[in-house]
Amino acid sequence: MGSGQQLYIKAKSIIPGGTQLLSKRPEMFLPEHWPSYYSRAKGVEVWDLDGNKYIDMSYNGIGSCILGAADPDVDSAVKAAIDSGSMSTLNAPEEVELAELLCELHPWAEMVRYARCGGEAMAIAVRIARARTRRDRVAFCGYHGWHDWYLAANLTNDRVLDGHLLPGLEPAGVPRGLLGTALPFRYNHIEELKSIVSQHRDELAAIIMEPIRDHEPEPGFLEAIREIASDIGAILILDEITAGFRLTTGGAHLILDIGPDIAVFAKAISNGYPMAAIIGKAEVMQAAQTTFISSTYWTEKIGPVAALATIRKHQRCDVSKHLVRMGSLVQEGWRAAAQRACLELEIGGIAPLGHFTFTGDHKQAAKTLFIQMMLERGFLASTAFYATYAHQNEHMESYLKATGEVFAHVAGALEHGTVVKELKGPVAHSGFGRLT
Ligand SMILES: Cc1ncc(COP(=O)(O)O)c(C=O)c1O
């Protein structure tokens, strides 16, 4: 057993769930055999605790390392910030510089607040919307973090969040008093939002969604969302935490031509250093002054410095163009390799955030076998690929060659019913599941 697995066994005895993020649980990849921990990461290369080197063709810091791990430009700015004191009684001037840059990139926005993580930034946006409208309920689509306002959706029954990325999540610890405050609708299903509006028109503080993720918006969908929000006086909050900075330098909404009242960024804006921004129209953002939103570490300097360096490099190097090109190569490669192997795959996601699923009764076992065999070939791979600026053609070539071999093998194993037998450990988990 590798050192990473041994450490993970120990971790589970002193850290509930083993890790701080569901998507980093080794069971989500290759139970009992995932390297689990890293000693070093640089660009797209990752070294585990035993010194094995892998090419990361999976999530690259769960979408945060948009330039690749340990980017030299971002890291040198961060090192300078550390040397000049990352925290003080006084404020970091970079907060103002970053606010100006974000408003310049998003001309509809006039004011900015900061946090350090995506979920907490979304909770801030929802608080501002509720403070501004003095209403309690929100309508939402998709995944937005772990906070009470969001998990309240599952108080009705534990299936409401199905289809919003976290099937079967129990909202234990979320006050039952929040029942009925978070009402879900599905992307491209405007009739579901209309039905919520018909029942709760004057009670809705916000409509909350990602501008794009798995599917292209159907013609008229985003326009209708904007129209409904304006019509009922609800704040339109676009969650750009994962979609932002993938398709352009800024929110995906800039190219989808939908104007929100608030947009929220985290993850990719600061290339692996904690930073989040809530940007919005002045009249909406001013409502933050009528409530209490305040935290010590939202004032440290590394986050804004990393964000300024990341965003400027993003702009200078036209990073999104590279991400779209790399992501498209991978999605086309999956399609071609699957066709050659006579393997049925469902492929989705915008180019820089592509994913696929195997089909049929053994799809989860097939995914596990894919991960196992790709790991043997030196790749951290799963059924999603988040492109970074550090990915180059040579990585695509070696990854797609390996993918072709593995798809052919998985297709054969599916045909002969040997998939589960070929696994060295249990089938990978999907969604949220208890580990004990
Ligand atoms: C769309 C979206 N919203 C919110 C979050 C939560 O962000 P964080 O994990 O930084 O709290 C994520 C994370 O995956 C996300 O993809």
Image (tube, rainbow, N blue to C red):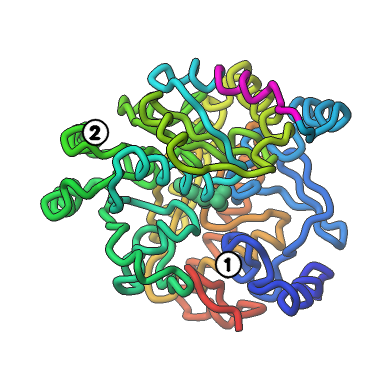
Above or below — where is 382 with respect to 305?
A: below
Please tell me in which quadrant of the rendered image residue 300 appears.
top right
Residue 94 shown in magenta: yes
Q: Distance between the residues labelled 2 and 1?
A: 36 Å
The residue lying at 81 percent from left, 28 percent from top is 81
Would you call the spot at circle 2 few (<14 residues within 10 Å), some (14-19), or many (20 or more)? some
Q: Horizontally, is 255 left or right of 24 in the view? A: left
Identify residue type, mark 2: Arg
In-front residue for pair 81/96:
96
Helix, strand or loop at mark 1: helix
**Residue that numbered label 1 is attached to:** 28
**Residue that numbered label 2 is attached to:** 226
Question: Residue 427 — which label?
Answer: none
Q: Characterize the magenta stretch by its predominant secondary structure.
A: helix
Please tell me in which quadrant of the rendered image residue 116 appears.
top right
Q: Horizontally, is 293 left or right of 299 in the view? A: left
Residue 355 shown in magenta: no
